[in-house]
Amino acid sequence: DGGITQSPKYLFRKEGQNVTLSCEQNLNHDAMYWYRQDPGQGLRLIYYSQIVNDFQKGDIAEGYSVSREKKESFPLTVTSAQKNPTAFYLCASSGPTSYYTGELFFGEGSRLTVL
Amino acid sequence: GNSVTQMEGPVTLSEEAFLTINCTYTATGYPSLFWYVQYPGEGLQLLLKATKADDKGSNKGFEATYRKETTSFHLEKGSVQVSDSAVYFCAPPMDSNYQLIWGAGTKLIIKP
């Protein structure tokens, strides 16, 4: 079945450490997104990529970095510069027809906790 | 820019009650509209969609009608179940940069 796979589902990090969250999709979608969700709040866009080797900052990119070397993969690194990284992170993608309508396909999410 | 206004939660109902979650939007043109559902600890799933005015999206007993005249896309279900407990997001219309600006969603709690 086609879909988006995020890993790990749960991750614990000590302060000062960088961590990388994986996002892989086999939907053949060009566009991929990373969102952050805090309790009781909506989704906030961290980074997005419309095509391989290209990505743009979203609303809260500070302290995060991404790469898009392959169409299928869009990993997110949470750096030590991110002051409050504890959150639920969601990866999403959109395809050739869904991109222009706004329909997104989501992964199961990764919950990061800083100890 | 494009945006949605969605009723705040939590909304608490008894099983078999009628559900309405209000959503109004502002947008240029006539964008596609979506409702997503997020179960505890999971990602968002598309619940239903409507691609043009007067369309009715439906899935799992939920319905929403795209009303251009009132710029609304209210979510309804005739008889809710405990398993419907989740957070429901009315997705905002895509903006000119093809991005979405999300609201907080509406948490629905169904009591047996």
Image (cartoon, coloured by chain):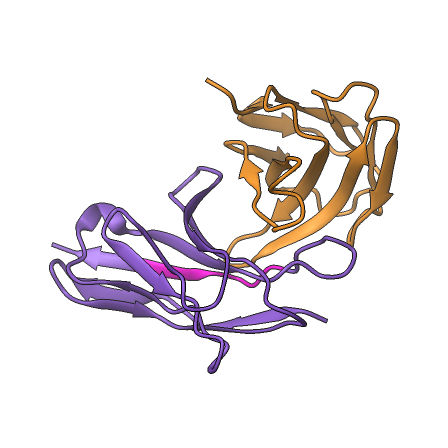
Chain colours: A orange, B purple
User: Residue at the spot x=31%, y=67% of the render?
Assistant: B11
Residue closer to the observer: B21 or A62: B21
Q: Quadrant of the C terminus of chain B?
A: bottom left
Q: Is residue B24 left or right of residue B96?
A: left
User: Residue at the spot x=50%, y=32% of the render?
Assistant: A108
Q: Quadrant of residue A8?
A: top right
x and y, in percent, of residue A114 in the image: 65, 36
Q: Quadrant of residue A12?
A: top right
Q: How many marks?
A: 0
Residue B26 vertical placement versus A111 (above, below) = below
Asked if residue A114 lies in the magenta stretch, the reply is: no
Residue B70 appears anywhere in the view = yes
Q: Quadrant of residue A98?
A: top right
x and y, in percent, of residue A67 in the image: 83, 27
Residue range in magenta is: B102-108
Residue A79 appears anywhere in the view = no
User: Residue at the spot x=71%, y=61% of the render?
Assistant: B95
Residue A53 vertical placement versus B75 (above, below) = above
Residue B50 vertical placement versus A55 (above, below) = below
